[in-house]
C-alpha cells in the first residue's frame, strides 16, 4: 500500500467584487471542516464535518480572517495566518503539508499575487449574492479563469449563491450558465448565525451541504485518511511552524 503523503487540497475563496461574503464563507468552511464546533457544545455532537486539520491563509489586506483567527482559531482547532499573498505557494508548500486542507481568503482584486494564488489552487469558490452587480462581475471572473486554464492551471471553479433570501434564483443561474461557469446547487441562505460568527459563534447548519461537496470534490476525506496512515505531524498552535 502506498502511504506517501499527499499534498493537501487548496481551496480559494475569491470574487473580484467585494461584499459577497467570501471571508465569512471561508471562516465558516474552515470551522466546519475542522470539526464544526467549540469543544463541549451541542453543535459539536452533531457536526457533519470530518475533523480535518485546517490551515486558513488570509491574503486580504483588510485582515478580517486573521483578526478572527487571533480571537477564536484556538477555540475551533484551526490554524489561521496572514500572508501578503506574494509567492504564497513557494513560502507555504512545505508547512502546508502538515494539514489536510488549505483554505485561502483572497482580496477582491485582480493582481499578479491573486492570479498566482489562483493558479496554484485545486478549487476556487466564488461566493455570489443573488444580485445583478455580483453576477455582472462574474463576466471578468470567467475571462480570468479561462486565461488561467490556457496557461495550464487546473483549478475547478464553482459559483455558490450566498446570502440568499426570497430572491428568484433562476434568472441569475441562467446568466451564470451563459458564462460557462459551474453553479453549485447548495445555495447559502441569509442567517443570523453569520454575524455571530465574528463573536465566536458557530456557522449555520445550512453550510453542511457545501461542506459535503468540498469533502468529496476536493479530496479532503482522502487527505485526512492519508495523514493518519502516514503519521504526518499535526500542526501546532506555535507561531513558528
Image (cartoon, grey):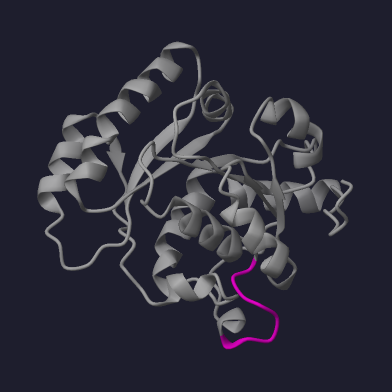
Q: Which residues are magenta?
A: 35-42
The answer to whether residue 70 shows anywhere in this view is yes
Measuring from the top left, give residue 152's x and y in whole percent: 50, 14
Residue 135 percent coordinates (x, y): 23, 41
Horizontal side of 30 relative to 89 (left or right) equals left
Q: As drawn, is 134 to the left or to the right of 95? A: left
Q: Is residue 92 left or right of residue 46?
A: right
Majority secondary structure in the magenta region = loop
Vertical side of 114 occupied by 105: above or below: below
**Image location of residue 222, percent across then percent down:** 64, 47
The quarter of the displayed image where residue 188 is located:
bottom left
- How many marks are shown on the rendered structure? 0
Pick out the residue farthest to the top.
151
In terms of image quadrants, where is residue 207? bottom left
Residue toward you, 54 or 215: 54
Q: Residue at x 72, y 37 (%)?
A: 6
- Name the residue rendered at 78%, 38% in the picture: 5
Question: Which quarter of the figure has residue 3?
Answer: top right
138 vs 125, left or right, is left
Which residue is painted at 48% across and 29% down in the image? 155
| 203 shown above or below 236 | below
Amino acid at each position: 500500500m502506498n502511504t506517501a503523503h499527499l499534498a493537501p487540497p487548496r481551496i480559494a475563496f475569491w470574487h473580484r467584487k467585494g461584499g459577497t461574503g467570501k471571508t465569512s464563507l471561508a471562516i465558516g468552511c474552515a470551522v466546519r471542516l475542522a470539526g464544526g464546533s467549540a469543544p463541549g457544545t451541542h453543535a459539536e455532537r452533531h457536526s457533519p464535518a470530518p475533523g480535518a486539520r485546517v490551515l486558513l491563509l488570509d491574503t486580504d489586506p483588510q485582515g478580517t480572517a486573521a483578526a478572527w483567527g487571533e480571537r477564536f482559531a484556538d477555540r475551533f482547532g484551526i490554524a489561521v495566518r496572514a500572508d501578503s499573498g506574494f509567492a504564497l505557494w513557494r513560502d507555504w508548500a512545505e508547512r502546508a503539508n502538515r494539514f489536510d486542507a488549505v483554505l485561502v481568503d483572497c482580496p477582491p482584486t485582480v493582481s499578479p499575487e491573486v492570479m498566482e494564488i489562483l493558479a496554484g489552487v485545486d478549487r476556487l469558490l466564488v461566493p455570489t449574492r443573488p444580485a445583478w452587480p455580483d453576477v455582472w462581475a462574474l463576466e471578468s471572473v470567467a475571462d480570468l479563469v479561462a486565461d488561467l486554464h490556457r496557461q495550464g492551471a487546473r483549478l475547478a471553479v464553482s459559483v455558490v449563491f450566498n446570502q440568499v433570501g426570497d430572491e428568484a434564483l433562476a434568472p441569475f443561474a441562467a446568466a451564470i450558465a451563459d458564462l460557462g461557469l459551474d453553479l453549485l446547487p447548495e445555495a447559502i441562505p441569509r442567517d443570523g448565525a453569520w454575524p455571530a460568527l465574528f463573536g465566536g459563534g458557530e456557522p449555520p447548519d445550512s453550510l453542511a451541504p457545501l461542506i459535503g461537496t468540498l469533502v468529496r470534490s476536493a479530496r479532503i476525506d482522502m487527505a485526512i485518511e492519508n495523514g493518519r496512515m502516514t503519521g504526518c505531524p499535526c500542526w501546532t498552535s506555535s507561531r513558528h511552524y
